[in-house]
Image (cartoon, rainbow, N blue to C red):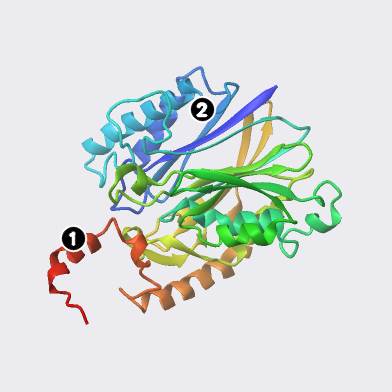
């Protein structure tokens, strides 16, 4: 039996400010999904101010009924958010009505379809206050870096490497790299995560899906700043894929990502359990949560809240130290993003107002 795993997220109202999700919204979402016959199973959670719907079903990717269910859930939660006067109610819902697929309508989506193996461990990563390119470095380390993933060296099922689908989010194009032989070529692109993002990873030979992420860019869809994208990522583990520990290892050393306050700053991606995923310092620093599930006939057994492990305490400490350093630069780059990432802020208005005051030298 083929299983589809859909992770669909949206920010439809913060509690308080941009820090978290009101518990009534989470309960409302659970009630709606529980009343639908479509899911085999589901889990509703949050990271920061984003509601995340994790749904298993048999209808394949981009299924209109599943996406309609998610859209209706977010609409209902938006209505409740407005009654509670939550901040930014409905901010990720960019359309007035559903058009058959939530892609391009605001919510972020990561979906994969696969034959469930004899044992099917899956990790769902969810981030807040950052963009899809935040996954580039961790995915590279999971599936291409032998210093992170020893299975690439000693596991015969992984030794041949993986295929990486990389998307150009500006020109709306994609290219597939075969690694390790095209690793250096791929790094030229994925090292620029504001434009190029790893969408999916496939096992060589079988083309079996190993990982997939959301690559929706809210600013590009809306034409204005409406909040950062807060991406999600699904990673299958073990038996030819990275072990659970190999998939988690990249987050033991926090890396810098774009987002943080008003989506306009660079900061460390801090690994946290769900109960600590409420960014408050300068609306940050950016957070990542990792929930592990054991799939059995489509049922989600779990989750294991992996970053609740105290072995990530040092990563959190380091992230706070890096946050202190970055904050000391205030409105100066590289804490503030470079100019081409500031087009949805006051920068265009200020430039237009002052253009006649610039004189030729």
Residue at 43 percent of width and 49 percent of height: 170
Q: Quadrant of residue 56?
A: top right
Within-10-Å neighbours for mark 1: few <14, some 14–19, many 20+: few
Dot 2: what SS? loop
Residue under label 2: 62
Indicate the quadrant containing the C terminus: top left, top right, bottom left or bottom right.
Answer: bottom left
In the picture, measured across the screen, residue 86 lies left or right of residue 353, that is right
**In this rendering, is residue 257 above or below 92?**
below
Q: Quadrant of residue 80?
A: top left
Residue under label 1: 349
Indicate the quadrant containing the N terminus: top left, top right, bottom left or bottom right.
Answer: top right
In the picture, measured across the screen, residue 96 lies left or right of residue 308, that is left
Label 2, label 1: how far apart the Cα atoms are: 38 Å
Q: Position of residue 354 (x, y in %)?
A: 15, 69
Dot 1: what SS? helix
Residue 130 visible, this angle: yes
Q: Earlier in the sequence, mark 2 or mark 1?
A: 2
Q: Position of residue 332 (x, y in %)?
A: 33, 76
Within-10-Å neighbours for mark 2: few <14, some 14–19, many 20+: some
Residue at 47 percent of width and 71 percent of height: 320
């Amino acid at each position: 039996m083929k299983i589809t795993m859909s992770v669909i997220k949206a920010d439809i109202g913060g509690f308080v400010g941009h820090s978290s999700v009101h518990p009534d919204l989470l309960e409302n979402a659970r009630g709606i999904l529980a009343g639908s016959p479509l899911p085999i199973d589901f889990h509703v959670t949050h990271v920061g101010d984003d509601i995340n719907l994790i749904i298993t079903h048999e209808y394949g990717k981009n299924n209109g009924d599943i996406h309609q269910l998610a859209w209706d859930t977010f609409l209902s939660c938006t209505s409740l958010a407005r009654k509670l006067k939550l901040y930014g109610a409905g901010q990720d819902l960019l359309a007035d009505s559903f058009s058959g697929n939530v892609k391009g309508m605001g919510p972020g989506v990561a979906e994969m379809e696969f034959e469930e193996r004899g044992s099917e461990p899956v990790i769902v990563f969810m981030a807040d206050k950052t963009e899809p390119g935040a996954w580039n470095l961790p995915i590279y380390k999971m599936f291409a870096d032998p210093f992170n993933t020893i299975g690439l060296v000693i596991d015969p099922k992984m030794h041949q490497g993986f295929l990486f689908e990389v998307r150009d989010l500006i020109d709306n194009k994609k290219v597939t790299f075969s690694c390790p032989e095209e690793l250096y070529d791929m790094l030229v692109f994925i090292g620029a995560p504001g434009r190029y993002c790893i969408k999916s990873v496939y096992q060589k030979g079988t083309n079996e899906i190993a990982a997939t992420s959301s690559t929706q860019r809210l600013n590009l869809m809306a034409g204005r700043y409406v909040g950062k994208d807060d991406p999600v990522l699904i990673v299958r583990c073990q038996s030819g894929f990275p072990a659970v520990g190999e998939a988690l290892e990249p987050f033991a050393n926090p890396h810098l990502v774009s987002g943080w306050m008003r989506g306009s700053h660079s900061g460390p991606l801090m690994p946290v359990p769900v109960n600590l995923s409420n960014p408050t310092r300068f609306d940050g620093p950016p957070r990542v949560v990792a929930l592990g599930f054991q799939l059995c006939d489509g049922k989600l057994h779990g989750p294991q809240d992996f970053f609740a492990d105290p072995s990530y305490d040092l990563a959190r400490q380091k992230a706070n130290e890096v946050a202190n350093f970055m904050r000391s630069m205030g409105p100066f780059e590289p804490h503030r993003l470079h100019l081409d990432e500031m087009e949805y802020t006051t920068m265009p208005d200020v430039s237009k107002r002052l253009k006649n005051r610039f004189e030729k030298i």
